[in-house]
Image (cartoon, rainbow, N blue to C red):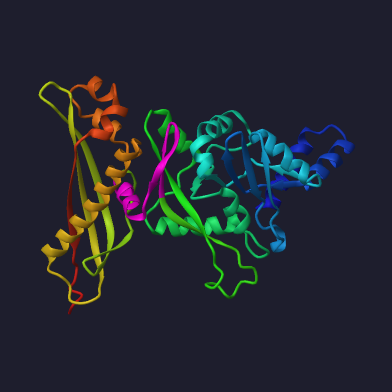
Amino acid sequence: MKRSIIILYVCLLALTGGCRFSLESDRHDAERLLLIQTMGLDSWEGGVEMSVSSGLGEEDAPALVMSTPATGIEDAIARLQNYSPENQLFYAHVQYLLLGEGAAQRELANVIQWADRSPTLRMDTDMLVVKGLARDAVVNASGQATDITQRLASMDRQARSMGWTIYSLRQAAAALAEGDGALCLAVETVPTDGKVFTEQSRTDAVVPSGYAMLGRDGLAGFLDPERSLGAELIVGDPAGLLITVGGCTLELLECSARIEGIDGADGSPAGVWLRCAVQAGLLETSGEAPAPEELDRALSETVGAWIAGAVAAAQEAGCDCLGIRRAVLSSAGDMAAWGGAWETIFPELDVTVTVDGQVERNYDLAE
């Protein structure tokens, strides 16, 4: 992939070059091109720290991993370039942007504005929030045989199998621009020493850890894994997710959520009704399968608890990362009453959650 990009870069330079000297010079510049694939950003009062990884090179050459404190993003990029004068660092193919907790709290708006205005970073770059420091994830998860980008690509598949979505910087920016909150996959670093014995270098693992809730003022809090599944049932498409209910393994086949605002007698917001329909298939049971109506009820109660937990956490954080405002505006009688002071209304709203769960049984596993 890297070789193809560099060859394309050389061809473009050749088309725009005017002489042999220019072509040779451009080819030399292309050979120095080093693609940064993962960028991490931490923040504290008065400064930032940027950490980057180039990913494994050709013939599994170790990744170039660097980190530096700086006064801002552009200053960090300039400092990193000074630390690697033999390479021309290229950021347009960054696959993952990791924000440490401090950066997610203080620098989120600056990062979005910088990425939108600068050609350095693409807005469709996948963004994640690290519980702790992004530097720890970038540096400690990289070694001789692996690097943070490789680990994140593997973790991406794991997160999707758990029902979670990795959202891009553009998706988060769009949700925040509409005045609501946004969801962002949260990750954490976990030591592998004493658990993994086949790797020569004991690098840390990077594992998904539910969702971070992002508001206009930055990081508002985290959802635990179960509440994160509840959030995904509301805003995403969790079809194919495997869950355990009543001692049975179920596969979610279809899920639909409908959110309606309830108007008071004077047209003011009185509450929200969130109705969810879930269909699942029975894959496995650890013992005697419960009766169909019992399994349906267990599915409804389990999913209902996840969804109610996600809503409660969002209200407590004052962060409408579940898109409730957008949903109720389409059904409310007085749109001005609902949309005018939503930040004040949302945390106090009475939200009623009902779930209709149905488990399909094409055959009896107990037979």
Give the extent of the magenta segment.
211-234
Residue depicted at x 29% and y 31%: 325
Report which quarter residue 46 is drawn in. Answer: top right
Q: Is residue 299 visible?
A: yes
Position of the C terminus, as image quadrant, is bottom left
Q: Is residue 65 left or right of residue 334?
A: right
Which of the 4 image quadrants contains residue 62? bottom right
Q: How many marks?
A: 0
Q: Position of residue 335 (x, y in %)?
A: 23, 22
Q: Is residue 93 left or right of residue 59?
A: left
Seen from the viewer's position, the closer of residues 167 and 50 is 50
Magenta-span inclusion, residue 224 = yes
Residue 300 against residue 51 in the figure, above or below:
below
Residue 248 location, x and y as percent?
A: 24, 69
Q: Residue furthest front?
A: 45
In this orientation, which residue lies closer to the viewer: 25 or 245? 245
Tell me which corner region of the image, top left, top right, bottom left or bottom right, holds residue 141: bottom right
Is the residue 33 above or below the residue 18 in the image? below
| Residue 156 versus residue 197 in the image, above or below | above
Image position of 50 (left or right of 78): left
